[in-house]
Image (spheres, helix red, strand yellow):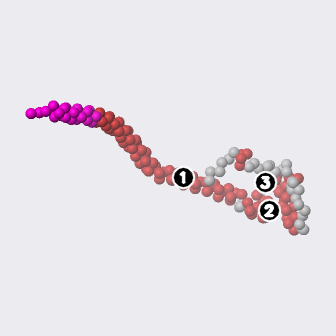
Amino acid sequence: MISLDQVQLLEHKVETVVAKITDLQKENDFLRSKFSELKVQYDEMQKANVELSAKVSLYEQNQPTIESGIMKALERLNNIEDSVLRVSGGSVEASISMPEQNLSSIPSGENSVAQSISAQYVASSKTAPQPAPSANPFPNIASAVPQQKNATETQQLDIF
C-alpha cells in the first residue's frame, strides 16, 4: 500500500517538475523572441553587406579611371609649371645672382627701373662693404613696382 508520506513526496516532486517546466517554457519563449530579433538584425546586416560589396566592386571598377584622371591632372600641372619656368627664363636663383642678364625679359616700361636697380646691385657688389641697409633699400622704385601679396592675402591654397 501507498503511504501518505509517499503521496506527499510524489505531489512535491510533481509540483517541482511543473514549476521547472513553466520556467523552461518562459525561457524558451524569451530565447525564441531573441532569436527572431537577431534574425531580423542578421537580415539587415546581410542587406548592408550586399550594398557595401556592390559599392566596393564599383570602386574597384572605377579605380583605374580615377587614377588615370589624377595622373592626367598631375601631368597637366607639370606641363604648366614647365611652361611657366620656360617663359620666366629659368629659376629665381638665376635672376637674383645675375640681374643684368635677366633685363631682356622685363617689359620696356619697367626696363629703366630694372636697369637702375641692376646698376646699383652691380656697383654695390664691386665696391667696399656698405653700412647697414636702411629700412627701404630702393626708395626710388617703391611706387613703381607693385607689392606682392603673400598667400594669405590672395587666399590661394597650396594643393601639394
- The residue shown at (61%, 56%) is 78
Q: Nearer the viewer, residue 130 or 24?
A: 24
Compared with residue 113, is residue 2 higher up or lower down, i.e. above or below? above
Quarter of the rendering containing residue 49: top left
The residue beneath circle 2 is 99
Q: Amino acid at mark 2?
A: Pro
| Place of residue 21 in the rendered image (x, y in percent of width and height, measured from the top left) | 24, 34
Secondary element under disc 1, as helix, strand or loop, is helix
Query: Which of the two discs, 2 and 1, labels the residue nearer the N terminus?
Result: 1
Tag nearer the camera, 2 or 1: 1
Q: Quadrant of the N terminus?
A: top left
Q: Amino acid at mark 3?
A: Pro
How far apart are the two marked residues, 2 and 3, measured between alpha carbons? 15 Å
Q: Nearer the viewer, residue 150 or 30?
A: 30
Query: Which of the two discs, 1 and 3, labels the residue nearer the N terminus?
Result: 1
Query: On residue 70, which mark appears?
Result: 1
The residue carrying pointer 2 sits among few (fewer than 14), some (14 to 19) or many (20 or more) residues within 10 Å by Cα, namely some
The residue beneath circle 3 is 107
Query: On residue 137, which mark appears?
Result: none
The residue carrying pointer 3 sits among few (fewer than 14), some (14 to 19) or many (20 or more) residues within 10 Å by Cα, namely few
Give the extent of the magenta segment: 1-24
| Place of residue 52 in the rendered image (x, y in percent of width and height, measured from the top left) | 42, 44
Secondary element under disc 3, as helix, strand or loop, is loop
34 drawn magenta: no
- The residue shown at (89%, 66%) is 129
